[in-house]
Image (cartoon, rainbow, N blue to C red):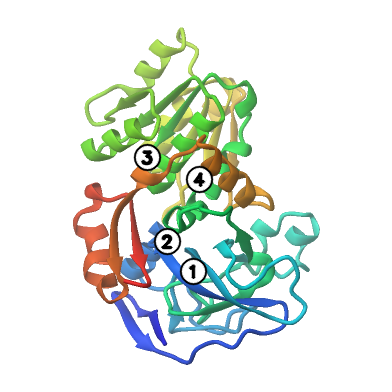
Amino acid sequence: MRAVRFHAKGDVRVDQIDEPICGEDQVKIRPAFVGICGSDLHEYLAGPIVIPTKPHALTGGQLPVTLGHEFSGTIEEVGQGVTGLKVGDRVAIRPNLSDGNCSSCLFGRPNCCRNLGFIGFSSNAGGLSDHVAVPAKHAIPLPENFPLDLGAVVEPLTVAWHAVDRSPVSTAKTAIVVGGGPIGLAVVQVLKARDVQNVVVAEVSDQRREYAVTLGATHVFNPLTDDVVAKVRELTDDAGADISFECSGVQAGFDTAMKSIRVRGTTVIVSLWEKKPVIDAFDVVSYEKHVIGAAICEDGDFEAVIEAIASGKINPRPMITSKIRMEDVEEKGFKALVNERDKHVKILIDIAA
């Protein structure tokens, strides 16, 4: 069968590999749509960081690995011991894997597992293939008539859902999202679904500011030309936002997220950093600010996002900016995200095309 595999920095290939066997407590899936994530792109540009170069502690997988951790599909085989799922069910895949035994898992936080792995990063089980076998508990059912292309964007929306859950969103009237990439735009949608009155986005790209408005932002500012902190204060009677979400991964963005919040406000760091940021501890102490992190998602987040999409509270369709064939994954996928970054939010690979 076909599989898109990561071999090395800048080296992604459509290989022929053996079709997987559906094991005990697994389901075999025919993937439908698969999204290219920013983390996929980072590995492609910088070389393996998350992708294991030696056998992974959970899967034993190592280079080359099959990509694809944002995907939907249809169950085509059910392994021994599996209940509640059947052939023909349409599902979205929760990709994060945990060992269940480390201190984080025993504390009830498997999303922070010390041996964290991913379907689509840690082995030859990845959505960018004609068939994939995954643990049945990672196949989250989709309602009847739920579009499979929207099923592929459930995963990034769960990251945003969890990040918003980590904040005091229930009492927030104003939130600022710093960085209008795919995750930042996902956060915007979740904030609107959670009835936050003012959703501000700070983003340098004209196109992505337009996407932010389409997806629910009430105010958008360009940090290159606007004093974002001053603008936020104007909106909040000089108090500052209740919560901010750092989705840019750069120092200037982090500074904006921190300076934009009110006394005892909360900044949630969602982005992954290549360099350690500097934090103004005096500002944190003086105004009793909170700084927290948000990692991946938790149990129940997939179901919550699926319900929000099905009910119309979230409409992520504008996030899908292109659909391509598997054979075009490098030229029209990875390279398009590099060379036409502002044009795209989420590129989906249509496995059947």
User: Label 1 sits on what residue type?
Assistant: Val
Earlier-in-chain disc, 2 versus 4: 2
Whether residue 323 is visible, yes or no, is: yes
Crowding near pointer 4: few (<14 within 10 Å), some, many (20+)?
Answer: many
Residue 230 percent location from the top left of the image = 36, 16
Residue 70 percent location from the top left of the image = 47, 61
Q: Secondary structure at mark 1?
A: loop
The answer to whether 56 is drawn above or below residue 283 in the figure is: below
Q: Report the residue at 26% width, 58% height from top.
A: 337
Crowding near pointer 1: few (<14 within 10 Å), some, many (20+)?
Answer: some
Q: Nearer the viewer, residue 267 or 76?
A: 76
User: Label 3 sits on what residue type?
Assistant: Gly
Crowding near pointer 3: few (<14 within 10 Å), some, many (20+)?
Answer: many
Q: Quadrant of residue 144?
A: bottom right
CB under 8 Å between discs 4 and 3: no
Residue 306 percent location from the top left of the image = 57, 48
Q: Which residue is mark 4?
A: 270
Residue 207 numbered tag: none
Q: Which residue is mark 1?
A: 50
CB under 8 Å between discs 2 and 1: yes
Whether residue 121 is visible, yes or no, is: no
Name, please, the residue furthest toward the top: 237
